[in-house]
Amino acid sequence: MKLQDIRNVAVLGAGIMGHGIAQVFAGGNFSVRLMDVDPGTLNKALDRIKQNLDLFLKKGLTTEKSAQATLSRIMTTTDLGEAVADAQFFVEVITENIDLKKDTFRKVDALCPHEIIMASNTSTIKIADIASATTRPENVIGTHWMLTPHIRPLVEIIPGEKTSLETRELTKALIISLGKVPIVADDMPGFIINRLQVGVFSQALKLLEQGISKEDIDRAWTHHLGLRYCLMGPIQAMDSMGLDTLYLACLYLAAVYNDPGLNPPNVVKEKFEAGEFGYKTGKGFYDYTGKSIDEIVAKQNEELINLMKTLDIKIC
């Protein structure tokens, strides 16, 4: 199957995530069958999609003609068989319960004798476990959309142990065709996004338990860390702060808190011993050879000022 062969998409689950995913596919010129067992949820989903499109109109992100065309491509149903009857791509967006997900994929597998890619929006469950309920695990893949999927650009793609290269590459091409940004994760519980998030949440809750106010914890993010990570990822951020600083800080924290888990990972130790500290040496996790660090920093400073102005955060 090729990208141009995908014309019909089935989305199972019309809740907070499902309605937005259906909207994205419909906006990408795909015919969408949005399925839910509850007719009331389907009606609410259509109302939410209309509200989303109204906001897009208000912000100049779409036109009246385009918005109406998007709505016209979405059909609703309470029947799974009807939803997947002629679909080439299926997205499951139900509760994070492995038994329910496996039962759903088992049913879709039986209902679709034709070629179909079966994707799960799971944020934590191994794709291989879900795929084990089907007779064609090579066609099963994870597509973890972010909350407010009609707005947020990122989609995690998670191939399972038996997912074929064709399924992986076709799914990636499909996500790109929708204007989204795919990242490919290994099939490990939590994948990339939630592995990163759980580290932040865990430390934030520990600080809260230690008596730091929730307001100050949130301000630490909104007035510094959130701004930094809007402009660069954590790997580049480590390069910018200096991997020597990171290495020594990790050693200090591990000793002070008597926590071996805070010791610098081997990958940081190797960079420290090689003298590759990041921006200050021209090489860290990234190679900055031939690039002006001053120009990089100046550009980042300009982007930071623009961001702070947009967020109405006082600069000086």
Image: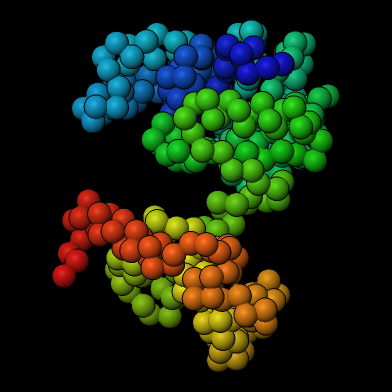
The reply to whether residue 167 is visible in this rendering is yes
* Rendered location of residue 74, percent (x, y): 45, 13
> Residue 272, relative to residue 311: is it above or below?
below
* Rendered location of residue 26, percent (x, y): 45, 17
- Relative placement, left or right, of 89 versus 52 is right
* Rendered location of residue 13, percent (x, y): 53, 26
> Residue 155, relative to residue 273: is it above or below?
above
Quadrant the N terminus occupies? top right
> Residue 47, relative to residue 125: is it above or below?
above
Q: Residue furthest front?
A: 290
Q: What residue is rendered at 60% in x and 91% in y? A: 255
- Quarter of the figure with residue 271: bottom right
Relative to the observer, which residue lies in front, 276 or 118?
Answer: 276
- Relative placement, left or right, of 67 versus 142 is left
- Quarter of the figure with residue 226: bottom left
Q: What residue is rendered at 47% in x and 14% in y? A: 29
* Rendered location of residue 308, percent (x, y): 24, 58
- Relative placement, left or right, of 21 versus 94 is left
Q: What residue is rendered at 61% in x and 75% in y? A: 276
The reply to whether residue 238 is visible in this rendering is no
Q: Residue furthest bottom?
A: 256
Quadrant the C terminus occupies? bottom left
- Quarter of the figure with residue 78: top right
Give the color scheme: rainbow, by chain, secondary structure or one colour.
rainbow
- Relative placement, left or right, of 248 versus 111 is left
Q: What residue is rendered at 58% in x and 25% in y? A: 174
Question: Tag count in the figure?
Answer: 0
> Residue 315, relative to residue 131: is it above or below?
below
